[in-house]
Amino acid sequence: MARAVIDPVTRIEGHLRVECEVTDGVVKDAWVSGTLYRGMETVMLDRQPEDAFYVTQRICGVCPISHSHASSMSTEAALGIEIPNNARLIRNLLEAAQFLHSHILWFYTLAALDFVSPINALSANIADTYALAQAAGTRVADFGAIAKRLTAFAENGQLSFLGGHYWDHPGYVLPPELDLIATAHYLEALEMQAVANEVVAVIGGKFPHPMTSVPGGTAFVPTEQKLDDILFRFTRLKDFIDTALIPDTLAIAPFILETTTYGGGCGNFLSWGVFDSADRDPYNRFLPRGFVTGGLTAEEVGPDDVTEYVEHSWYDSASGLNPAKGETSVNFDEYNVDNKYSYGKAARCKEKPAEVGPLARMVAAYVYEAGGKTLVEDTSVRTPKALIDLTLEALGVAGKPEVLVSLLGRIAARNLEAAYVVDLALMWVNELVGAIKGGDSSYFKARESFDGQGAGLWEAPRGSVGHWIDIKNNKIQGYQVVAPTTWDIAPRDAAGVAGPMEQALIGAPVFDVERPLEMLRIAHSFDP
Amino acid sequence: MAHEGHNALHDLLTVRGVTRRDFLKYCGSIAAALGMSETMAPQIAAALEGAPKLMPTLWLNGGSCTGCTESIAQVDSPDVATIVLDYLSTNYFETIMAAAGEQAEKQIEETIAEGGYIVIYEGSVMTGQDGNTLLVAGKKGTEILSEAARGAAAVIAVGSCAVDGGWVYGYPNPAEATGVQAWLNHEGITTPVVNLPTCPVNPEWIVAMVVQLLLVADRDVAAFVEKTEWVTRSYTDRKYGAVDLLMPKGIFGQSIHDNCPRRGHFENGEFVTEFGSKEEAMGYCLYKVGCKGPQTFTNCPVVRWNRRTSWCVEAGSPCIGCGGLNWVDNNSPFFHRLADMQMGDALGNVQPGSVGAVVGGVAAAALVAHGLGMKAAGRVGDGPPMEEMKKYDRKRLAKKGGDK
Ligand code: SF4
Ligand code: SF4
């Protein structure tokens, strides 16, 4: 029996510690700890609702748009505002740009280095690399030049951000040619995530922390030129997703197939739903709302189904509260896995731990489509079920969607979601152009009320995000946020049930407790 | 140029496929961001060419949202700006580094032991719960900062959180956040700190500072301080008292209002009064929906964001003054002018703890300066002429028929 610890978990947003008890090379128990407290909910008190839109998105610099949307939606729900259709489309486009930015950045910059070794890429044969790229249907780059650049980097003796890592770990199993291809795309991905954020800048002024999805709609009024700028960038992103992200995923998968056998976790999947459709029904969002706890059925789920426990978290507020009545009273105590060990609260859905994120959303969408419902009328859009079925076939497990509930499934789901979202984005740009040409010039609805309570339930790239607001006389009386990471990195609850990431770690193999690569992979797969 | 063909820059350009012309153009924009003439471009390029090996850098995340890291990823890539950033050997950078846990922490120890490095600090300094509001590898975030800063050649505080605590410092500051300079004062650490506010930091400013420190000043911090023009902003931290902040004047010496493309509409009294309206479609001034451009000193309208794609006002939002100090308390409610607050319940909308900061603080009043035809320059930390500002606001609101 040994303890394997990763602190800090790097290549994530925020501060995280993962600790596992490992016996005979297998994780027997796991504790995941959020190690930062900032107190956003308390800072929001007594301010005006619009201020919450601007400030609360600063909880997360990787998914500020989703927080800002959840915040505005909570205010709109509280004050009875339905935003105009053009604002709906513009918010969808803004959110889509963030999804694409986040997923591309996550795969290449944050997660890939758990599988891809740029050091091993140094020994790639250039001709073979071209041949492999062609065979895998993935895009070619100037592989020779990139190899040269890598060599210069390595020879200089200053490895910079690649330094200090255990590149000789036997878990790095890709052939050097594939390492080189992925490294080339790592560099291109840096460009593409920035292109996605140029869309954010056009609509929202800047990324991170865009400015225009104010409660009531949007402050952004598109011009023809700006719509062109947006369309052009989404087209480039689609090209990259189709010719790099998806084929790279499929090329790497066969080498790491054993990752379909662990890392699945609690098996309960929550999606609040994201990308509003014209009818504004959360169950008909383009990625629909639903709670799936096994099988191909989804339960209805809403703001009242959430409770947060603090028995194992550094708070002394009451435990088991719904966020509408939530309290946040921080009180640090020592780190002790048998008692309190995290600033994360244990969020539970219908009293169960719930995994959130692309896998959860794709599962909910799969169930929706498997039930015979149509997600998108436009047949040029590749829907989640079609994408998943194709992938299962390519991996030789056709008809077995349950394989997705694994480490590899969580990785693949994120990339497949990107393919779906970019198709949707292209569709929405055209819809918006049509609406504007048809004479719709409404983007914002001013509020008429100054009191109310509401919840904004939405999805960030990394999972379900909820903001709860209580407004009296135009001042915020109560504000609570249940962030995506709150769900996935949740510690144990009152009953001692482990959180989703903890459960995903339990049962995973660990080859070397001093260099727990497998634990790192599982943590990263949640994009915490 | 000296050493042509044998230096790191030349190799980098070749490998990246960047033409010399593009590179010079980029150096010109760096010069502009530093407030120098663009004719300085060849000198900057020459300095880059003579640059020695990489500068070890520790990028530390305090109480951050990782937004400033995200922001630095939004530079021209993989071309020119990244070349400058390639001069930094980021030995520790939580968000992108391959290593994790123990292996990552070793990188910090080794870099500190070797010396001659800089620290880039992102996020608030977390002092709450006796410093336990941020733990990394079981260590308090404050201790990590102090240890790294003590031996550093310089610290660059990137983003408002690192500068003065940012939104996390917003009343009532439950996590007792503060800024890097305030913390180092408290610890008696005298390493120079360069402050780059806004939320997040604009990556072009980091590039400009890197050029200035590593290349123009040849890593000599004394020369760096001497060769750069600075403004000093002063504020009072509720816990740590008076703090003076050094900021590059080229970036933080002029108000947003000064350079705003909508300024003509301001002068004409043409205002947006509702979001998404036809006035917005015509690009009218956002002053009446709360724009803090007049009292915020950054070059956002010039440098813009996301590879110069756009910026807040261009997209239709009022500036919320995220480049000001204690920006959340001083500038919210964001959709209101000071005049509205005064006409309402006598500053009743301002957080109780922030009134003092507003009155004695740093919301430098370019508005009045410009309204009266004066030029804001040099030291701007002596507190805004609040009364004049309010008078000006009242006058504008009372003006009959002038505002559209
Ligand atoms: S008030 Fe704002 S929008 Fe108007 S001119 Fe000044 S900076 Fe520009
Ligand atoms: S324009 Fe204002 S709100 Fe926008 S980044 Fe600059 S200082 Fe911040």
Image (spheres, coloured by chain):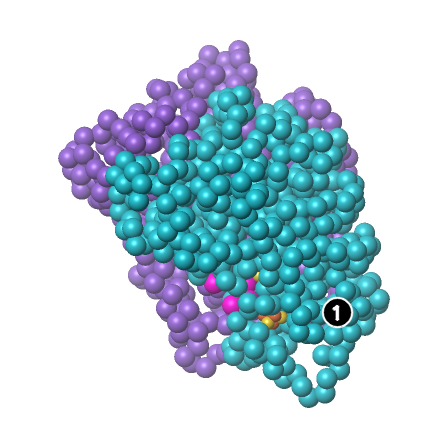
The residue type indicated by label 1 comes to Met
Above or below, comparing residue A274 to residue A306 in the picture: below
- Residue A128, quarter of the rendered image: top left
Most foreground residue, B270 or A4 = B270
> Could one spot residue A197 in this view of the protein?
no
Query: Ligand 2 sits in which quadrant?
Result: bottom right
**Is residue A23 shown in magenta?**
no
Percent coordinates x, y for residue A125 in the rendering: 18, 30
Q: Considering the numbered disc 1 on the image, is that residue within a helix, a strand or a loop? A: helix
Please identify the dominant SS of the magenta region. Answer: helix
> Could one spot residue B108 in this view of the protein?
yes
How crowded pointer 1 is (Cα within 10 Å; few <14, some 14-19, many 20+) is rated as many
Which residue is drawn at the image coordinates 65% and 23% (left, top)? A337
Drawn side of residue B183 relative to residue A24, left or right: right
Which residue is drawn at the image coordinates 39% and 37% (left, top)? B51
Percent coordinates x, y for residue A380 in the rendering: 30, 61
Most foreground residue, A467 or B70 = B70
Drawn side of residue B335 relative to residue A239, left or right: right
Q: Colour of chain A?
A: purple
Percent coordinates x, y for residue A159 in the rendering: 39, 28
In the rendered image, the quadrant that contains the C terminus of chain B is bottom right
- Chain of the residue where label 1 is placed in the rendered structure: B
Most foreground residue, B52 or A6 = B52
Q: Which residues are magenta?
A: B310-314
Residue of label 1: B389
Q: Colour of chain B?
A: cyan
